[in-house]
Image (cartoon, rainbow, N blue to C red):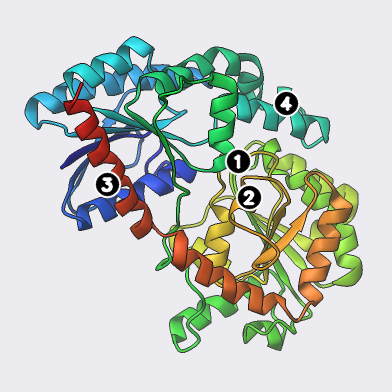
Amino acid sequence: MHIAIVSGEYPPRWGGIGSVVFHLAGHFVELGHEVTIITRSHQDAAPSQEGVTVIPVRWAKLPMAFTRSYGKSALKALKKLHSNKPIDVINAHLPLVSWKRKEFSWLEQNIAPVVSCLHGSWLGEKEGVKRAAAAKESATWKNPNDLAILTTAGWYSKYERAGVLESSICVANSQSTLKEFKEWYRPSDDFDYEVILWGCDHKVFRPPNIDDEAEQLEHERIRKQYGCDDEASLNYSPETKTPMLLAVGRLVARKGYMTLLRAMPKILENNPDAKLVIVGRGHMKSSLEKTAKKLGIEDSMYIQSSLSFDELAQHFRSADLVVYPSYYEGQGLIPLESLASGTPVATVDQEPLTEMVDESVGGLFRRGDPEDLARCVNDMLSSSETSTKAELGRQRVLSKYTYEHNASDYVDVFNRAIEKNKSK
């Protein structure tokens, strides 16, 4: 089967969608399929994967508008690709590509059935930005992307609706996302859909190997870098008095970093030598640094704007707890990557996060509530059950949330879409 994946993100342009597409493509190849990825051009070359061809296309570097310009370029690339190497199925990752209903229909009739992946919605993003603004996470006018989402999400949502109405099959990445799309776009009774929660790479995101000397040295380097290097921590012991808290994601308002910072003083009351390490890029870095100084926690916070994939994976292993305070997600991969790494996670008590994380494998706190976040973190750092939760979390990932699971599930969906298209 020749699978053409249309994704606005692909390495080196990382993000949740980019990570999913990169790993999923490799697993499709392992199952014997040929994969071509059509993505936005980037100044750096895409990584090489055997059996995966990457076609970069032009796009307008403007908030929201890039989805339409990229969509037009991707459409041209699909036509050219199909003339040279017939495509069996098109896998379009929404919302980062915008096609009109007639364009989806044309693809279905002239090239191949379309299976659209629903990674959350623009209207959901808008609600997340509004929630974050109401909680004084960040002034939306400071970030062109947030401002664009607030003012144009309604307009661009018509392209998502087109995908829902015209694709052979839609696959939502959570029950929460499916509910959003049904509520906002009201598909017909014959709407064909599946829910497949994305997994993570359990071979990259894995527990520590204490017998690997090079890995142990890297763990010690990281812990010393952030001043979290008492003897217990260097031996991965939960008895550490210098706990390392890790938060990962873009530095934008809806990720909830200000809530996390406001929780830190109470966390430090119970754990005075704790350190918070934030990994992400975005417009909020200076605001976070100013807020940390205002709260008197600047010596307890570090921001890493750029880490390699291997460095990020080691940070997950080396941390004592991952905190994920997001205001909106289509699914949210960070908690899964934490659990796969054998590291406990604290996240918001809201779907879709609760579709993956419950109190048997992690901790939950009220969204946007610094005091409840601090309560959750302090409870997890002091509880003897936290290590057991981390072990159960790893088992949960292996049983349900891997790219091996995703790849086989998607191949079944692709085959169903192909058969469905033949019967039209």
How far apart are the two marked residues, 3 and 4, measured between alpha carbons? 40 Å
Q: Residues within 10 Å of mark 4 (few under 14, many from 20)?
A: many
Where residue 181 appears, as percent x and y from the top left, is: 54, 27
Where residue 259 appears, as percent x and y from the top left, is: 80, 47
Q: In terms of sequence position, does the residue under pointer 2 or pointer 3 come before the other?
A: 2
How far apart are the two marked residues, 1 and 4, measured between alpha carbons? 18 Å
Q: Please say whether residue 37 is visible from this viewpoint.
A: no
Q: Which residue is mark 2?
A: 353
Q: Which residue is mark 4?
A: 140
User: Can you say whether 289 is above or below 162 in the image?
Assistant: below
Q: Which residue is mark 3?
A: 411
Q: For numbered disc 2, what is the local secondary structure? A: helix
How far apart are the two marked residues, 2 and 1, measured between alpha carbons? 8 Å
Q: For numbered disc 3, what is the local secondary structure? A: helix
Q: Amino acid at mark 1?
A: Glu
Q: Amino acid at mark 4?
A: Thr
Q: In terms of sequence position, does the residue under pointer 4 or pointer 2 come before the other?
A: 4
